Amino acid sequence: MSEADTSTQPLISVEGLHTYYGKSHILDGVSLHVGPGEVVGLLGRNGVGKSTTLKTIMGLVNPSAGKVMLNGTTINGLPAHKLARLGIAYVPEDRRIFRLLTVMENLRTGLDRKGMTEERKKQLLDKVFTFFPRLAERSNQAGGTLSGGEQQMLAIGRCLMGAPDLVMFDEPSLGLAPTVVQTVLRCVRDLNREGLTCVLVEQNVAVSLKLASSAYVLENGRITLSGTGAALLTDDRVRQAYLGL
Ligand SMILES: Nc1ncnc2c1ncn2[C@@H]1O[C@H](COP(=O)(O)OP(=O)(O)OP(=O)(O)O)[C@@H](O)[C@H]1O
Ligand SMILES: [Mg+2]
């Protein structure tokens, strides 16, 4: 999907976001837009504020200034569980698997939408198991006994149980073996093809720019470059700074 279609209202708009941890000024006026059906990449070196951007959008960290809008409505100040009910999901860097709960129990904790029928719950579970057959095979196994890649699938599967419209992935391939990295990133691609809007923070810059319809580069809390994934992939500044070319 192309970011050039400006007639569509962004699903998420972030405008002039400033976020502090104590006195440390982390986000220094971040603005970005995520259109429906897009994969939007967020790139940047360690410690520049990528996770803080996702956490601020998700209502886990309060901004001191700026706006986060969902379909044109300001959602600043809403707690994370309310945002989850509005269709926004976040898969954190550390996955937060309940190690002692089974795969099935972990998935059930993701069922958080009010008034959901048993039939709808079953549909969601079936969808997750169809998408990740490995989770179905391991449904009675404790979360803590899964491999790193399986835990990432579980973290993603659990957030899909909330039937989100948008999922923000924070470094989903971190610490995984190269073949598993491919599997996880293919999941993001396939979920997007099924209509899920995605924000992707990913160390693997070349792969994420190939997946991303548009992307932003964050440096010291500011967006310094943005464009289509394809344009950034051939941009000399990106190639030198992030692709070692
Ligand atoms: N809870 C916190 N309290 C204080 N400082 C924090 C907190 N979380 C993050 N920071 C600091 O804020 C800055 C931005 O952190 P953030 O996690 O957003 O960066 P990042 O771009 O996601 O980095 P990485 O690539 O390492 O994941 C860093 O300097 C970090 O040390
Ligand atoms: Mg981070």
Image (spheres, rainbow, N blue to C red):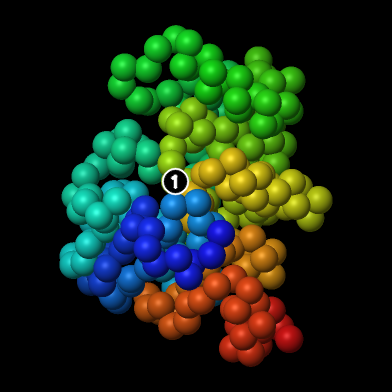
Residue holding disc 1: 166
Where is residue 176 drawn, in percent x and y?
A: 71, 51
Query: Which residue is at a point 68% across and 31% down the rendered structure image?
Result: 132
Residue depicted at x 51% and y 56%: 38
**Image quarter in which the N terminus is found:** bottom right
Q: Is residue 236 above or below residue 225?
A: below
Give residue 220's position: percent from left, percent from top.
40, 79
Instruction: Name the spot of residue 229 as percent of width and height, x first.
Output: 59, 71
Q: Is residue 198 visible?
A: yes
Q: Amino acid at mark 1?
A: Leu
Q: Is residue 92 visible?
A: no
Q: Is residue 49 above or below residue 227?
A: above
Secondary-structure class at tag 1: strand
Name of the residue lying farthest toward the top: 118
- Residue at image position (65%, 77%) is 233
Image height of 96 relative to 171, above or below:
above
Label 1 Cα neighbours within 10 Å, binned few <14 / some 14-19 / many ≥20: many
Q: Residue 135: percent from the left, percent from the top?
A: 68, 26
Name the residue at 79% across, 55% down.
178
Identify the image quadrant of the C terminus: bottom right
Identify the image quadrant of residue 80: top left
Q: Tell which residue pokes out farthest to the right in this image.
A: 179
State the residue in front, 9 or 220. 9
Is the residue 23 above or below the residue 99 in the image? Answer: below
Closest to the observer, 46 or 238: 238
Residue 84's image quarter? top left
